[in-house]
C-alpha cells in the first residue's frame, strides 16, 4: 500500500519522472520475484505479480490522461480505472472520485457528480463502520443501495487485510463523521441541481439520523425545507419531466486500440438527437485519425468485422431505450423510476428473410436486441461497457401484435390523460382509424386474420392473440372517440363525424375477422388445454 501511495505521488508531482525507467524497474522486480527459488512455494511471487500489474495499469492510465484531455468519455474512463486501481487504498480512491466529480461539474453532468460523492460517502461509511459501529451512522456501503446498487463496489476488503489508522490509511478529514456529512450534502446538492429529487431524498434519509444524533436542529430544519420544495416540484412536473438520452456506440478498427470491437451505452444530455451524437463523435475522431479514416455505420445490423477496411475506423451508433420485463414495470411506476438505476437497454432492427430491411406486412420481421451494461445508470461516468447481448426475433404476425398493443397503450394514455389534451387525442386517433397508409391496423387484420372468416379454421396461438388485441384496440378507439366528442369545438364537428364514420367502417370490416364461431372457439379451448398439459407446473 505504501508503494502504491509513493508511486502515485511520484507520477503526479515529479518533474523528472521517467516512465520508461519506472517500467524497467517494475520489470526487474518481477524477474527477481519469479527467480527466487526459496519463495516459489509461497504466495509471495503471485502477490508481487498482482501488485506490479496494478501499478503498471495505474501508471499507464495516468500517463494516457494527458493524451485524452479533449475526449471527455475516455478521460473519465481512465480516471475511473485509476480510482479502481486504488481499491485497496481508500485515501487515494477518494481523491480520484473527487477529481471525477470536479470534471463532471465542469461539464454540467450534475447527476454523475452526485454519484461520485455517493460512492465517496459509501467508501467513508464502510471504513467508519470498521472503526466503530454506531447506530446513527450507515452500516457501510450496503446502506447506499437504494441510492444506487453500484455503491456495493465500495465494500471494503476484509478487516484482516486493512486496519484503518494503523496502516496509515483513512487518515484524511473525510474519514470522520463530519467528513461523511459533507460528502452526503454534496451528493444531495448535485442531485437537486440535476432534478433527481427522489435520489436526493434517499441521500437525506442517510444524513438525517446523523443530524438527529448530533441535535443539529438548524440543519434538520434546512433539510426538511429542501425536501418540501423537492416534493412540490415533483408534483408540479408530473408528466413533464425529461431525463437523459441513451445510445449504443460500437467501435471497430485497430486505430481505436483498446476500444476495438467494444460497445458502450452512452448517456447523453436530455433530448439529444441521433445526428448530434453522430456529428460529435465523427468530428472528434476525424480530428484524431483524419477525416477520410472515420466512417459512421448508420444501420443497426450486426457488424461483420471481416468486411471492414483494417486501415479505417468505424463507429456504429444506435438509439436505445431502457428495457424492463413486465414484472419490473409494476415496481417502476413513475417516469423517474424508469430512468434511474437502469442497466438494460433495447433497440429494434427491421428485416425481411430475403435480406431487405423493409417489406410487405407478411414479410416484415423484427430483431429486438437487449443490451446489459456492467453497471447501473446513472454512474460515476457517462458511458458504460456492454457486457451481455440477447436477441429476440419476431415473426411478421408477432410484429403486428406488438404494433397493435403499442397503439392500444397510446390510445388509453391519450384518453385518460388529465387534464385532457385534444390535440394529442386527435393525433393518436388519426393514426389509428384515420390512417390511409397500406400498413394500418385494418390492413394488418386483413393480412393475418382473413382465413378465420370462413368460420371453420382454428386460429393459431398468435392469431388468437392478435384477435384479442384487436378487440381491445377497437374498444379503446370507441372510448377515445367518445372523449373527443366532449372536447371538440363547434368548428370541428365535421372532423368528428368523419372519424366516427371511419371507425364504423373499421368495425364493420374487422368484426368478421375477430369473431369466432362455436366450432372455432371450441378449437381454441382444446388447443389451450393441450398446451397447458405440456407445460410443467412451477411451484
Image (cartoon, grey):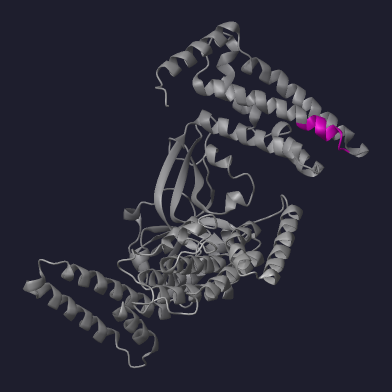
Q: Residue at x 57, y 71 (%)?
A: 181
For the view shown, which residue lies furthest in the left direction?
37
Location of residue 381 in the rendering, given as x and y in whole percent from the top left corner: 49, 65
Location of residue 243 in the rendering, given as x and y in whole percent from the top left corner: 62, 57
Q: Please state, as top left, top right, bottom left or bottom right, where the N terminus lies in the image.
A: bottom left
Residue 123 lies within the magenta run: no
Identify the magenta region: 480-488
Dominant SS type (magenta): helix
Location of residue 444 in the rendering, given as x and y in whole percent from the top left corner: 60, 28
Location of residue 326 in the rendering, given as x and y in whole percent from the top left corner: 54, 37
Of residues 357 and 124, the one nearer the viewer is: 124
Q: Residue at x 44, y 50 (%)?
A: 372
Q: Residue at x 54, y 76 (%)?
A: 102
Question: Is 49 left, or right, of 225 in this rendering?
Answer: left
Q: Please state, as top left, top right, bottom left or bottom right, where the C terminus lies in the image.
A: top left
Q: Is residue 436 above or below residue 4?
A: above
Amino acid at each position: 500500500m505504501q508503494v502504491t501511495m509513493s508511486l502515485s505521488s511520484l507520477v503526479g508531482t515529479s518533474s523528472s519522472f521517467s516512465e520508461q525507467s519506472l517500467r524497467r524497474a517494475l520489470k526487474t522486480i518481477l524477474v527477481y520475484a519469479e527467480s527466487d527459488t526459496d519463495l516459489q512455494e509461497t504466495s509471495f511471487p503471485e502477490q508481487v505479480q498482482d501488485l506490479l500489474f496494478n501499478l503498471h495499469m495505474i501508471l499507464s492510465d495516468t500517463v494516457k490522461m494527458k493524451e485524452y484531455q479533449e475526449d471527455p468519455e475516455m478521460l473519465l474512463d481512465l480516471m475511473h480505472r485509476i480510482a479502481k486501481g486504488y481499491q485497496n487504498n481508500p485515501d487515494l480512491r477518494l481523491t480520484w472520485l473527487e477529481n471525477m466529480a470536479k470534471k463532471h461539474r465542469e461539464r454540467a453532468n450534475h447527476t454523475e457528480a452526485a454519484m461520485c460523492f455517493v460512492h465517496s460517502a459509501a467508501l467513508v461509511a464502510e471504513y467508519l463502520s470498521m472503526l466503530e459501529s454506531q447506530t446513527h451512522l450507515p452500516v457501510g456501503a450496503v446502506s447506499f443501495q437504494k441510492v444506487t446498487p453500484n455503491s456495493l463496489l465500495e465494500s471494503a476488503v476484509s478487516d484482516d487485510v486493512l486496519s484503518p489508522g494503523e496502516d496509515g490509511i483513512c487518515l484524511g478529514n473525510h474519514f470522520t463523521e463530519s467528513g461523511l456529512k459533507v460528502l452526503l450534502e454534496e451528493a444531495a446538492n448535485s442531485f437537486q441541481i440535476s432534478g433527481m429529487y427522489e435520489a436526493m431524498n434517499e441521500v437525506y434519509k442517510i444524513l438525517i439520523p446523523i443530524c438527529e444524533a448530533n441535535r443539529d436542529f438548524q440543519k434538520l430544519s434546512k433539510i426538511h425545507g429542501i425536501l418540501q420544495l423537492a416534493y412540490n416540484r415533483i408534483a408540479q412536473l408530473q408528466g413533464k419531466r425529461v431525463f437523459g438520452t441513451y445510445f449504443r456506440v460500437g467501435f471497430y478498427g485497430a486505430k481505436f486500440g483498446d476500444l476495438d470491437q467494444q460497445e458502450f451505452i452512452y448517456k447523453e444530455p436530455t433530448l439529444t438527437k441521433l445526428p448530434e451524437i453522430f456529428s460529435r463523435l465523427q468530428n472528434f475522431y476525424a480530428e484524431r485519425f483524419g477525416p477520410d479514416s472515420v466512417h459512421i455505420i448508420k444501420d443497426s445490423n450486426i457488424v461483420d468485422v471481416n468486411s471492414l477496411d483494417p486501415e479505417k475506423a468505424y463507429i456504429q451508433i444506435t438509439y436505445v431505450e431502457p428495457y424492463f420485463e413486465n414484472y419490473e414495470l409494476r415496481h417502476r411506476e413513475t417516469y423517474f423510476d424508469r430512468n434511474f438505476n437502469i442497466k438494460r437497454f433495447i433497440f429494434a432492427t427491421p428485416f425481411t428473410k430475403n435480406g431487405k430491411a423493409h417489406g410487405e406486412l407478411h414479410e416484415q420481421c423484427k430483431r429486438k436486441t437487449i443490451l446489459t451494461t456492467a453497471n447501473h445508470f446513472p454512474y460515476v461516468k457517462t458511458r458504460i461497457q456492454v457486457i451481455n447481448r440477447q436477441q429476440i426475433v419476431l415473426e411478421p404476425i408477432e410484429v403486428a401484435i406488438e404494433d397493435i398493443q403499442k397503439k392500444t397503450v397510446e390510445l388509453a394514455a391519450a384518453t385518460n390523460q388529465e387534464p385532457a389534451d385534444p390535440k394529442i387525442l386527435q393525433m393518436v386517433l388519426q393514426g389509428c382509424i384515420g390512417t390511409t397508409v397500406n400498413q394500418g391496423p385494418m390492413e394488418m387484420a386483413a393480412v393475418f386474420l382473413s382465413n378465420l372468416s370462413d368460420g371453420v379454421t382454428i386460429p393459431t396461438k398468435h392469431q388468437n392473440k392478435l384477435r384479442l388485441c384487436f378487440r381491445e384496440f377497437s374498444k379503446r378507439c370507441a372510448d377515445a372517440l367518445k372523449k373527443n366528442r366532449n372536447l371538440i369545438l363547434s368548428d370541428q364537428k365535421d372532423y368528428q363525424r368523419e372519424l366516427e364514420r371511419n371507425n364504423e367502417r373499421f368495425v364493420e370490416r374487422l368484426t368478421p375477422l375477430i369473431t369466432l364461431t362455436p366450432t372455432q372457439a371450441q378449437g381454441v379451448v382444446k388447443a389451450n388445454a393441450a398446451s397447458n398439459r405440456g407445460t410443467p407446473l412451477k411451484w
